[in-house]
Image (cartoon, grey):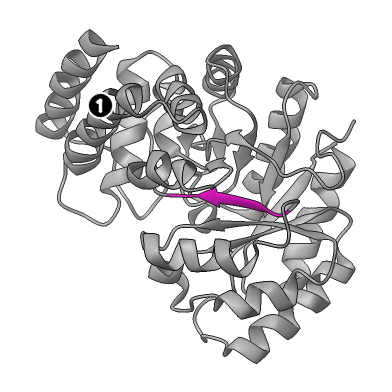
Amino acid sequence: MNHLKPNVPLRGIIPSLVTPLLDNDTLDMKGLENLIERLIKGGVHGLFVLGTTGEAQSISYDLRRRMIEETARINQNRLPLLVGISDTSVRESINLAELAAKHGADAVVSAPPYHYAPGQVELAEFYLSLADRLPLPLFLSNMPGYTRVNFAPETIRSIARNKKVVGFKDSSTNAAYFQSVMTTMADRPDFSMLVGPEEMTGELVLMGAHGGVNGGANMFPHLYVEMYHAAAAGNVETLRRLQKIVMQISTTIYTAGKSGSNYVKGVKCALYLLNVCSDYVATPFHKCNQPEAERVRAALIDIVKQL
């Protein structure tokens, strides 16, 4: 069953799931089940696996395939399932997309090839060619901090001429840029506009975005779902109250350590302390050490009191 309806944008909170691991080669199966059931109970509107929060860039293709298969099995078509296929190899992206389709996923998500940064013409040509070869609808993912390329609004418009390209997820942290894309795509109300950074999601949903791909929802799905609904309804008073908690998460749990992996290891540490899944982080990164974990624990206690 495909949950994506023709000419209707995907809306709501679609968390980018962590990939629960016992070690570099082994999924934490009980943890994955706990996580997905927690998210569904929390009211999220979809699931997104193998994104940045899911450490897709750090895990093997075997583990990526297993994550797709097991997530689909546990989900049992209850929610829309999006699968990340970002890669420097077009063939590997297509392989993952074909597996995702086989297991009932609803769409795939792709950030531009990294290492060699393509120009805008090359970017448009790449995605128009890729979309034609995919068995599922495609969401474009803008992650200039990791890929060193930013989709120009007109490039998105050009790529979206292909009707298999159904949405855009932006993690640029640039609100003015996001609004320029919304303006460029204003005549395509069917085209999903999703926000990556949770710190900006409420504000941009107020401005017309359709939802958020928020990693913090792994920990507190109810919070992010309530934030989305408040913003979608224009309930600014409730949104302000919830935004303070979202920012508290961002400035505590995501900053417990002093490395580029702070965000992922902070989320995984919190999930471990909440008895959801293992806190193992894929090599070459480390899980929170004891002082960092204590900072996360203290932050969790304070945040839970407010929920």
Q: Residue at x 34, y 15 (%)?
A: 274
User: Looking at the image, which residue is at 38% across and 35% down?
Assistant: 280
- Which contiguous range is marked in magenta? 191-196
Residue 161 lies, with reference to residue 281, above or below; the image says below
Q: Is residue 13 magenta?
A: no
Q: Which residue is more in the foreground, 254 or 286?
A: 254
Q: Secondary structure at mark 1?
A: helix
Inspect this view and state whether residue 113 appears: no
Which residue position holds label 1? 245
Magenta run includes residue 194? yes
When asked about the image quadrant of residue 210, the answer is top right
Q: Main secondary structure of the magenta part?
A: strand
Location of the C terminus (image quadrant): top left
Give the residue at x 72% y 23%: 75
Closest to the observer, 171 or 114: 171
Dot 1 amino acid type: Ile
Residue 41: give x, y in percent of width and height.
57, 11
Figure quadrant of the N terminus: top right
